[in-house]
């Protein structure tokens, strides 16, 4: 019995030594693999700007764009990729202007706003920053809308006439291992119910608090150009801006210190800023802006090379033309800088624009919300419609086409 136990013990000792060696080898291999590869955190920041109360496709009759039901379909497609995403709106969501247009009654405008809230509740929204147009029916009405919304209204500088904060200033959203801080802001405008504090000063008061809780800081800004310029020169830690109060659509973030994106107006486009993070301590590089800078500088040099051999040195050709030579050198520096940024980018922003055209199917659930609300609007608005069934406020109201 004693000899049998001793034999088992020897076998057990050998087995333990073997397992120890195997564990060490496994840990070494795992460590080497970890050192050789670096995980990438990806999140899509989906944004709209200046929807202006549009609930259906609008614009040119042969190619109407937009609509809440199409937007929802695209978001579902992004959701199906299993990559993380957030949905935001930068303001001027509910109404076209700061005041209701002639012929649009309060009841019609209210019903239209309810459609948007009900649709957003189903689609999902992680932050909405009110713009000047969103107060067209007054503060009390917007607060009523907020109560029915299951998404946060945020603004750091819009206050009531007594100076009391109305909305929470920011919202922190977690996706995967990333924390994203959204700050709401608006350029100053006049409204009898409101006091609009200086946006940059208001931002300075909370930016450290938000930055300490966030890996990415996003500003939802109903912005005038002067405030964007001040912000670009402020050195505040903002990673990107979704900007309302502009009809222009961005092709990239603008190539400045802080990328700025505007999705145009009337909800015709959904913008997707894809953020890829390898190292949370490194800055974000706007890939779209660098690619466009590279392409534009190359095109300019090609135009300057016209009527000269393709392999000719422009610096030699324009050696006696200081002004043109300076431009050549500037474009070459821009090409070198863009190439360097693209090759060495660690954390990146990439813009993808979704045109909400007729190839995108309406999501039935959202379309039902829109159609149901429209039935109520049509009953109330019948006396105001033109021969084509269009209400005042429609850009084609009263036209024969």
Image: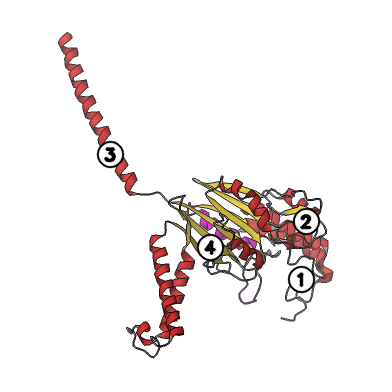
Q: Circle 3: is it few (<14), some (14-19), or many (20+) Cα within 10 Å?
A: few
Q: Which mark is residue 195?
A: 2
Circle 3/circle 2 CB separation < 8 Å = no
The residue at 71%/49% (across/down) is 167
In the displayed structure image, the side of residue 401 where residue 361 appears, left or right: left
Image height of 328 relative to 286, above or below: below
- Between the C-alphas of marks 2 and 4, the distance is 30 Å
Q: Colour scheme used in the picture?
A: secondary structure
Circle nearer the viewer, 1 or 3: 3
The residue at 83%/59% (across/down) is 192
In the displayed structure image, the side of residue 187 where residue 299 appears, left or right: left
Quadrant of the image occupied by residue 58: bottom right
- Location of the N terminus by quadrant is top left
Q: Position of residue 309 (x, y in %)?
A: 33, 88
Q: Which mark is residue 257?
A: 4
1 or 3: tag closer to the N-terminus: 3
- Between the C-alphas of marks 1 and 2, the distance is 28 Å
């Amino acid at each position: 019995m004693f000899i049998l136990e001793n034999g088992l013990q020897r076998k057990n000792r050998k087995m333990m030594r073997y397992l120890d060696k195997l564990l060490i080898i496994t840990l070494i291999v795992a460590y080497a693999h970890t050192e050789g590869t670096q995980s990438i955190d990806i999140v899509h920041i989906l944004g709209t700007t200046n929807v202006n109360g549009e609930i259906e496709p609008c614009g040119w009759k042969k190619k109407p764009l937009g609509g809440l039901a199409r937007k929802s379909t695209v978001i579902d497609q992004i959701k199906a990729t299993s990559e993380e995403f957030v949905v935001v709106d930068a303001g001027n969501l509910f109404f076209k202007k700061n005041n209701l247009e002639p012929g649009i009654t309060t009841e019609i405008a209210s019903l239209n706003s309810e459609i948007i809230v009900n649709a957003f509740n189903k689609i999902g929204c992680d932050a909405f920053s009110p713009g000047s147009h969103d107060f067209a029916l007054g503060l009390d009405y917007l607060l009523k809308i907020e109560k029915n919304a299951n998404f946060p209204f945020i603004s750091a500088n819009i206050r009531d006439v007594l100076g009391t904060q109305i909305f929470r200033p920011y919202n922190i959203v977690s996706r995967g291992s990333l924390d994203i801080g959204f700050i709401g802001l608006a350029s100053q405008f006049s409204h009898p119910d409101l006091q609009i504090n200086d946006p940059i000063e208001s931002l300075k008061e909370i930016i450290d608090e938000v930055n300490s809780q966030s890996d990415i800081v996003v500003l939802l800004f109903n912005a005038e150009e002067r405030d964007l310029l001040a912000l670009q020169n402020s050195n505040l830690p903002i990673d990107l801006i979704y900007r309302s109060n502009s009809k222009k659509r961005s092709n990239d973030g603008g190539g400045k210190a802080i990328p700025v994106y505007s999705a145009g107006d009337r909800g015709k486009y959904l913008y997707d800023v894809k953020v890829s993070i390898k190292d949370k301590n490194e800055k974000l590089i706007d890939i779209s802006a660098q690619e466009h800078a590279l392409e534009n500088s190359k095109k300019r040099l090609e135009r300057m090379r016209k009527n000269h051999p393709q392999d000719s040195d422009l610096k030699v050709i324009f050696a006696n033309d200081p002004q043109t030579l300076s431009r050549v050198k500037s474009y070459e520096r821009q090409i070198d800088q863009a190439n360097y940024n693209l090759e060495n980018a660690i954390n990146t922003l990439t813009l993808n624009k979704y045109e909400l055209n007729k190839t995108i199917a309406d999501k039935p659930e959202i379309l039902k919300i829109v159609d149901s609300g429209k039935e109520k609007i049509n009953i109330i608005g019948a006396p105001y419609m033109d021969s084509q069934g269009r209400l005042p406020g429609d850009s084609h109201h009263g036209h024969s086409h």
